Amino acid sequence: MRRFGLHPARWIMRPDPVRDAPEMIHELVCTTCEVASGAQGDFDAVRDWAFAHTDANPTHLRYFEMAARPWRLVPADGDRR
Ligand SMILES: [Zn+2]
């Protein structure tokens, strides 16, 4: 069972950029038809896809964004593992 609440700060959580990979991955899903843009590292690309999707389907006006970013836990005492 997971425990929540105060705990000793043994770990620090930091973004963990992957070399040669985008810092964040974005995907937009049309909430009307559930068609997705596909995952892209460039938000402008998924935004442009949404504009084109609504141009082709003028009643499809709402989107849900899914975003992913890699994270890494590191020891709070500075020990690099
Ligand atoms: Zn749609």
Image: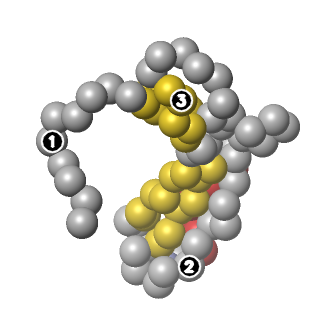
Q: Residue 21: which quarter of the image?
A: top right
Residue 5 — which label? 1
Q: Which mark is residue 74?
A: 3
Q: Position of residue 30 (x, y in %)?
A: 47, 72
Q: How many marks?
A: 3
Q: Amino acid at mark 3?
A: Val
Q: Disc 2, disc 1: CB below 8 Å?
A: no
Which residue reaches farthest right?
20
Residue assigned mark 2: 35
User: Which residue is the extreme one toward the left?
Assistant: 5
Residue drawn at (57%, 59%), measured in percent from left and top?
27
> In the rendered image, is residue 47 in sight?
no
Of the residues under marks 2 and 1, which one precedes in the sequence?
A: 1
Q: Secondary structure at mark 2?
A: loop
In depth, the one of 66 and 48 nearer the eye is: 66
| Relative height, residue 40 to residue 60 (above, below) | above
Residue 80, picture quadrant: top right
